[in-house]
Image (cartoon, rainbow, N blue to C red):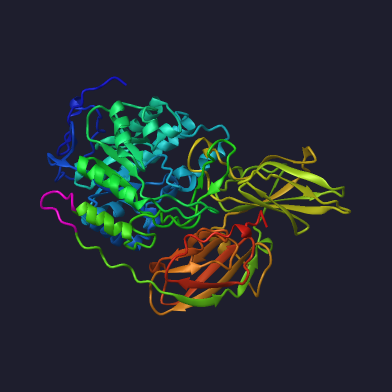
Amino acid sequence: MPKTRFKLFRIFAGLAVASALVWPMASQAATAAPTHTFAIGDKDFLLDGKPLQIRCGEIHFARVPREYWRQRLQMCRAMGLNTVCAYLFWNFHEWEPGKFDWSGQADAAEFCRIAQEEGLWVILRPGPYACAEWEGGGLPWWLLKDPDIKLRSLDPKFMQPAAAWLKEVGRVLGPLQITHGGPILMVQAENEYGSFGRDADYMGAVRQALVDAGFDVPLFACNPAGDLHKGLRSDLFQVVNFGKDPQSAFKALRAVQPTGPLMCGEFYPGWFDTWGAEHHLGNTPQYLADLEYMLKQGASFSIYMAHGGTTFGFWSGADHPAKPGGPFKPDTSSYDYDAPISEAGWATEKFSRTRALMMKYLAPGETLPEPPPANPVMSIAPFSLTESAPLFDNLPNGMMDTAPRNMEAYDQGRGCILYRTTLPPGPETTLKAAAARDFAWVLLDGKQIGVMDERTHADTLTIPARSAPATLDILVEALGHINYGQEMYNRKGLIGPVTIADAAAPGPWQVYPLSLEAPMLAGLKWKSGAASGPAFWRGSFTVDKLADTFLDLRAWGHGVVWVNGHALARFWNIGPTQTAYVPGAWLQAGKNEVVVFDLLGPTKPVLAGLEKPILNELHPELDFVKK
């Protein structure tokens, strides 16, 4: 890229001086008059004309109970941050095409308003792609209903809904830009696109969609150091992401952007966890040394994550294979991330050391508030789940098909799906699918005969000889669409062709979508006592106070848990996570209902509440494939 002379990038009271910009602002929207100005200068960010070092931290409001947003933001401010990064996950707000949700837990505008009240600026990251170990990287599952769609490209089948999404974001959050009196300083276009593609025209289309949506603050792009040149545009400010070695990363940034303030868009103090692998812990001394380097140099940064929180319910994604055909690695529901603020909002040692470091580099006259009190925690005595509802006794109405298709083809985005057909009498034979995403339990006349596993690409098994017609059931569970890399075309369910001894599997097939959503749970037929095989379990506990706790799931196999209708987490006895975070705000004085869906069945149907999480207890010997 030829060197471009950097011009002052300023935002005044609703007036854009577009002719002077290297990184242009978007068009104006008439709202409240601003009380501050923000600019990108030759060397610094400028707030009201004075240098501003952005000390930012990532916090995802979708991963924090709404009732706790203020406490978590107060923790961020007390740690020394003056800004927070806020991702928007497109699918969290538009799970169904054209139906946008900004209420309750999805009220992004309220989160930004609370941040402003707590003395924090906001950097908005609306996508359309996010990554963040979130289901599909934030891309809606329904995009994959089209077999020919090209994600993150100029394909109109992607860009039209993506532009409509960004227009809706502008409608809701545009009035909260600093140009209109709000806390939003900058808006990110896409996310780490250089790790996926190199089409600068696509990045231009995303930028234009933000402009058309009414964003008139600086627009920027982020990438790892080695990908900064891919999709590069001079009309987007560039920041670089890294976990260590800021000197080398900033050198790479200067190679593509000779002037302007230096900024790390994602600075990693820890890392995320995947099922079956050890809980990640960051290198705290290295993290602090690199953080101090940036503080000394006047470079801006965003700690990813300042507070990770929890990927509640079904929203966790899956790590991409290291290379095509590599291992599938679904992400845990705990997103603790070894961040300075723990999953439950506690101040860790890393928090205290970060705060102490930040205090050495505050602006003249700046002080930090004291951290707010931690939310109370409690233990809950062991209690039994005394009712059950076997899955195969609670199937919804099915649909007929000539051959199994992927889950999205049946208008389903997550949960489980059951494929059923009748096999004629015959000798032992071989069943094979192109893929089973992500796990498939295969049963013949109700007896399990094998498991297909996306992690190891185990998609072939033996069907025993049959002296009479037999019912073949293939129960497939989806564990989150891949959220990173070229393998995001990660449709779920059975991927055809499905063959038996190299010939098309017989049909017709009866297909039962099992969304595991509230309507399905409300229609379950409960009975007293235990169940075998895939089943729902129900019980309750009583409390006289409201406090956080962690459900101990070590006696259970693999599935999902709900408390008072809130989908808390996926669980899996192989670890490393063995607990589910229960926010006290989601409990009620008196009786609280727990529902567990377990595909394997528990060793005993008992739960308890712990005062601390179990984040690093591995049991590979319990893996249902290896057993």
Quarter of the figure that contains the C terminus: bottom right
Q: Nearer the viewer, residue 503 or 27?
A: 503
* Res 79 quadrant in image: bottom left
Looking at the picture, how far across and down is residue 106, in whole percent?
A: 38, 53
In the image, which residues are magenta? 360-368
- Specify the farthest residue to the top: 2
* Res 237 quadrant in image: top left
Q: Residue at x 21, y 40 (%)?
A: 297
Quarter of the figure that contains the N terminus: top left
Q: Nearer the viewer, residue 242 or 132?
A: 242
367 falls in the magenta region: yes
Q: Residue at x 33, y 58 (%)?
A: 341
Looking at the picture, how far across and down is residue 543, in whole percent?
A: 43, 78
495 falls in the magenta region: no
- Specify the farthest residue to the right: 467
Relative to 159, residue 357 above or below: below
- Specify the farthest residue to the left: 365
Secondary structure mainly formed by the magenta segment: loop
Looking at the picture, how far across and down is residue 128, in whole percent?
A: 40, 39
Relative to 99, residue 39 above or below: above
Task: Count the marks.
Answer: 0
Is any atom of residue 31 visible in this view? no
Q: Nearer the viewer, residue 281 or 325?
A: 281
Is any atom of residue 318 visible in this view? yes
Relative to 357, residue 5 above or below: above
Q: Nearer the viewer, residue 525 or 382?
A: 382
Looking at the picture, how far across and down is residue 338, in whole percent?
A: 39, 55
Relative to 561, residue 103 above or below: above
Horizontally, is 382 left or right of 309 in the view? right
